[in-house]
Image (cartoon, rainbow, N blue to C red):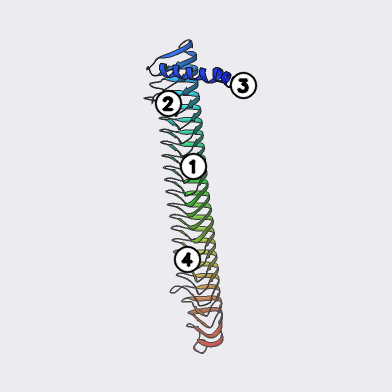
Amino acid sequence: MKKTIRCIRFLSIIVFPAAVLLAVVYQIGCVEAQSLDIPNRRYGLSIGNSREFTGLRINFRDRDVDEIKGVNITLWKAGKNESADINGLSLGVFSPEAGNLTGVQIGGIGVQAHGDLTGLSLGLLGAGAGGDITGITFGGLGTGAGGDITGLTAGLLGAGAAQDITGITFGGLGAGAGGDITGITFALLGAGAGGDITGMTVGGLAAGSGGDISGLTIGMVTGAAEDVTGITCGGVTGAGGDLTGLTLGFLGAGAGGDMTGFTLGLLGAGSGSDIKGITLGGIGAAAGGDVTGITFGGIAAGCGSDLTGLTVGGIAAGAGGDILGVTIALGTVRTGDDNDMTGAAVSAYNRINGDVTGLSLGIVNIANDLNGFQVGLINYVRDNPGYRRILPLVNWNFD
């Protein structure tokens, strides 16, 4: 009996007044621009579709609102409300919706601003703005802006902006910007920008940009149409321009321009221009221009121009230009036509088509001119005197 009495008291104190209030809100709110305002039409408590108000406002459905400051509670999706400015706390059983929303916005379905969305915004399904989003924004399925996104942004499916994203961004499946991305970006499938990416970027499958990438970038495939700078890790990693820093490509790493720093490509590492630094290619390491530093190619290492430093090619190592340093291969070390080798060449067959300055060690050693030693079974120096032109074991000359 006591429990029954308590239940009746609860209904009489809480539920019945709430039901009456909802009925009043609905009746008043259904008539456009009609409201019950206490103590006056400008501030205090407003029930209904008041257009300009400061204080606590409760309305069934916002329509043609001008400006609200304070607490705005709505029960249904707004009508034509694109020019409204709402500042403060906006609570929508369906969704807060206005031209510009500033403050704290919480929507049972979503949060929508036709212009800018600023502050803390939580939408069960989504949160979006036709203009900029600034602050902390969470959309259960997604978050999007027609302009920029700045701050902490999360969308279980995705987060995106037509222009720039700045701050910390989580996109469950993807995160993208038509412009630049700056800050920390995480997406299970992919993260991308039409412009530059700067900061820490993790794309489970891919991370890429139409411009430059700078910072820490991780993805199964990572790449930029222009330059990549920083720490880059991916199954395949590449840059249309220069690649600079620490680069780990579990399948391959490459650049259309220069490659500088430490580069590892388990299958291969290559550059359309120059390579400088430490370069390791599981199958090969190569550059269209010069290679300078420590270079290793599991099968071959070489370049189209000059090769400088320590170079190891599993089977072959060579240069289209000169070789300067120590070059080692099981099969052959070669230079381009009329190009020289200075340092040491160690392989089964050393074919130096110019001058050798230093040591050539192999089974067969061939050079045009020699300033040093050849050590091998067959040693040939074209410009040596006739009796020393071809010798077994050792050949020498000192200019």
The mark nearer the N terminus, 3 or 2, is: 3
Furthest residue in direction right, as rendered: 2
Q: Which residue is mark 1?
A: 156
- Using the image, tell me which numbered label, if any, was put on residue 1: 3
Q: Which residue is mark 4?
A: 286
The mark nearer the N terminus, 4 or 3, is: 3
Residue at image position (48%, 67%) is 306
Give above or below for 384 relative to 94: below
- Residue 144 falls in image quadrant: top left
Which amino acid type corresponds to the residue marked 4 in the rendered image? Ala
Which amino acid type corresponds to the residue marked 3 in the rendered image? Met
What SS does tag 1 mark? Answer: loop
Q: Which residue is mark 2?
A: 76
Q: Are marks 2 and 1 in contact (CB under 8 Å)?
A: no
Q: Are marks 4 and 2 in contact (CB under 8 Å)?
A: no
Q: Does residue 23 appear anywhere in the picture?
A: yes
Q: Is residue 369 left or right of residue 7?
A: left
Q: Quadrant of the C terminus?
A: bottom right
User: Gap in Å between the C-alphas at discs 4 and 3?
Assistant: 89 Å
Crowdedness of circle 4 by 10 Å Cα count: few (<14), some, many (20+)?
many
